[in-house]
Image (cartoon, rainbow, N blue to C red):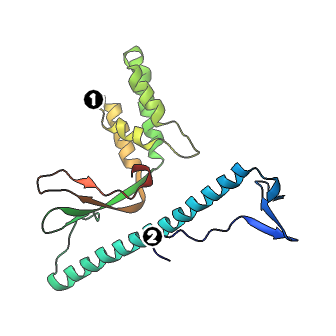
């Protein structure tokens, strides 16, 4: 099978006593003769697309594995032959062709969780808002509400919490609250991303080489 051929997909049909049947969404066998032609056509279209999608997904997985193998091999060779390394302490690195027209960016993203210190921060922030009363802007109150609103048990809105850290508020209790948020941060994991770029000239803008179906 070539990389462009779809994965084999079951036809969805079964033959029982010489008659063709297809399962419906409840798992019951329905004679093909009783199924509307447009529903049969839709079934065929979906199975054909899914066959291509499965093959493409496997190809992307192989590409990702080969990419990490190639970069890892290059780094090992660099260390062995020259005693040199690339990238920063967190693992972020950029590799570029000699002509400067193609580059690969490796980025390591940390997953952040919060410890019990976050509740201390919430108490201090509430004290500030209650004392400021009418002086507290509605936008600030809304930001605090969003930051500490849990969509799922034990989870908070991390992006909104990080926005709180960027606010310039001099009140000592607010400052202690922000320090409590920083103390609450825990790195619980990380994920490595590889992004590929190209440009038409050394002065041109970088363009991402997309392998994301939503952005293709």
Residue at 18% in and 50% down: 205
- Residue 40 visible, this orientation: yes
Q: 125 and 4: which one is in front?
A: 4
Please indicate whether residue 104 sits to the left or right of residue 50 in the image. left
Q: Relative to residue 20, is residue 134 depicted above or below? A: above
Give the number of the mark in front: 2 or 1. 2
Q: Relative to residue 197, is residue 215 depicted above or below? A: above
Q: Alpha-carbon neighbours of circle 1 within 10 Å: few (<14), some, or many (≥20)? A: few
Residue at 52% in and 64% down: 52
Residue at 67% in and 56% down: 43
Percent x, y for residue 122? 45, 35
Percent x, y for residue 81? 17, 85
Percent x, y for residue 171? 31, 28
Q: 163 and 35: which one is in front?
A: 35
Percent x, y for residue 54? 54, 65
Q: 27 and 191: which one is in front?
A: 27
Kind of element beneath mark 1: loop
Kind of element beneath mark 2: helix
Q: Which residue is mark 1?
A: 170
Q: Which residue is mark 2?
A: 59
Q: Quadrant of residue 192?
A: bottom left
Please indicate whether residue 82 sits to the left or right of residue 149 in the image. left
Q: Relative to residue 38, is residue 175 depicted above or below? A: above
Q: Relative to residue 167, is residue 35 depicted above or below? A: below
Q: Which residue is farthest bottom?
A: 81
Q: Which residue is farthest right?
A: 17
In the rendered structure, which disc, 2 or 1, sits on the residue that comes first in sequence?
2
Give yes or no for contact between labels 2 and 1 (Cβ–Cβ under 8 Å): no
Q: Alpha-carbon neighbours of circle 2 within 10 Å: few (<14), some, or many (≥20)? A: some
Residue at 52% in and 62% down: 53
């Amino acid at each position: 099978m070539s990389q462009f051929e779809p994965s084999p997909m079951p036809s969805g049909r079964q033959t029982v006593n010489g008659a063709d049947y297809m399962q419906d969404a409840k798992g019951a066998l329905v004679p093909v003769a009783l199924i509307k032609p447009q529903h049969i056509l839709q079934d065929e279209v979906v199975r054909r697309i899914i066959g291509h999608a499965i093959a493409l997904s496997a190809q992307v997985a192989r590409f990702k594995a080969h990419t990490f193998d190639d970069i890892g091999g290059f780094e090992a060779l660099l260390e062995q032959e020259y005693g040199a390394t690339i990238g920063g302490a967190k693992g972020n690195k950029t590799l570029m062709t000699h002509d400067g027209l193609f580059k690969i960016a490796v980025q390591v993203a940390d997953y952040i969780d919060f410890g019990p210190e976050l509740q201390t921060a919430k108490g201090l922030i509430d004290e500030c808002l209650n004392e400021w009363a009418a002086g507290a802007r509605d936008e600030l109150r809304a930001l605090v509400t969003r930051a500490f609103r849990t969509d799922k048990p034990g989870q908070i809105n991390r992006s909104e919490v990080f926005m709180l850290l960027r606010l310039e508020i001099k009140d000592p209790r607010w400052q202690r609250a922000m320090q409590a948020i920083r103390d609450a941060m825990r790195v619980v994991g990380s994920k490595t991303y590889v992004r590929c770029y190209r440009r038409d000239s050394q002065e041109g803008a970088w363009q991402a080489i997309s392998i994301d179906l939503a952005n293709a």
